[in-house]
Image: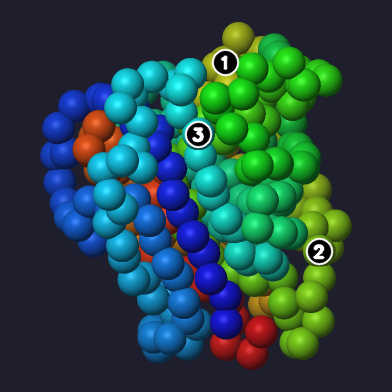
Amino acid sequence: MFLMHLSMSNSRPKGNDSESVCSCVQLGLSQILVTPHQTSTLDHPFLFSFYNPPASEFCPSGSRESVSMTFSLVENVIYAVLTATEKIGQFHWMIVVAQSPTFGFQFHATNKFGTQWHYECVPWDLSYSSSSSCSSCSSWETDSEHSFLDNAVSFTPIGTMSVFGESLDASHLHEYLKDIPIPHVSTADSLYDERMSSLWWRQAIRVLHQSGLFVRCANLDAFEGEIKRKSTAAEYASFVHPLPRVLSTKLAGPWPDS
C-alpha cells in the first residue's frame, strides 16, 4: 500500500477553467490521498480520496515569494510530470522516479543554459520551499531544479520500480533511457519548447512499456492527450485550485505482475 499527500498554497492565476476534465478540477481540492484499492483495466489502480483543507491553509497574499509547499512522493513510484512554460497549455514533459517522500530523480530532454538539446537524469529535491531565499543554492543546476518544482503543474503515477519483488532504483531506469536519440536543433530554441521535450518523453514511455517491467501504456497517444487536457484545465483553474495536481489515469500503470 502506498500513500501520497499533496498540500500546497501556490496558485498561478491565468483565467477561467475552460473544461472540467477530471474530478480534481471539478471538486476543487488541494489535498489528495492516493491508495491502491480500486481495480482498473491495468489491474494496478490509483484510487483518489479527497479532502478540502480550511482556507487558513492558503497563502492570503497569493504571491510566489510567500508561498510554501509540502509535496510527498510515493517511494518507488514512477510519475509523468508536466511543468508550466510561458504559454498556458504547453508544457515541459518529464519522468520522475521517487526514492523518498521528498526526493527523486527527473529524466527529460533539456537545453537549459543555452546548450544543445540533450538527455538528462538529475536529482530533484522536493523539500525546497519557494519561500526560501535560494541562498543555499550552490549551482545553476540547483536553481533550475527549484524552477521546475515551482512550475510543476501535474504529477501522474504511471508505474513502479518494484519489479518482481525487487525494488530497483533510478540507475536501472537510466540504463533504459540514456540512449534515446534526440534530434539536433538550434540552441536558440526555448528550454520550454514542448515539441522537443514531448518527443523524447513519448519515446521514453515506449521504451519503458516495451521493457515489460516499469510502465504499461498500450495507447500512448490517448494517454498523452489525456494528461495534457487535464493539466491545461488545471492551469486555467489554478487561481482557485492550487498547483501542482495529482492526476489519475487508466491508460498507464504498473504491469500486473510487478
Q: Where is residue 138 in the image (x, y as percent from the top left)?
A: 83, 20
Q: Which of 134 and 15 is in front in this view?
A: 134
Please name the residue shown 71% across and 59% down the image. Answer: 100
Residue 5's place in the image compared with 36, above or below, is: above
Secondary structure, mark 2, is loop
**Which comes before the other along the chain, label 2 or label 3?**
3
Q: In which quarter of the image is residue 184?
A: top right
**Which comes before the other along the chain, label 1 or label 2?**
2
What residue is shown with label 1?
A: 189
Calculate the distance from the C-alpha at mark 3 to the C-alpha at mark 1. Answer: 32 Å
What residue is shown with label 3?
A: 68
Q: What residue type is labelled 2?
A: Asp
Q: Which amino acid does label 3 sit on?
A: Ser
What residue is shown with label 2?
A: 169
Badge 3 density bin: few <14, some 14–19, many ≥20, Cα 10 Å: some
Q: What residue type is labelled 1?
A: Asp
Please name the residue shown 39% across and 76% down the image. Answer: 47
- Left or right side of 137 for 72: left
Mark yes or no: residue 116 visible: no
Q: Quadrant of residue 162?
A: bottom right
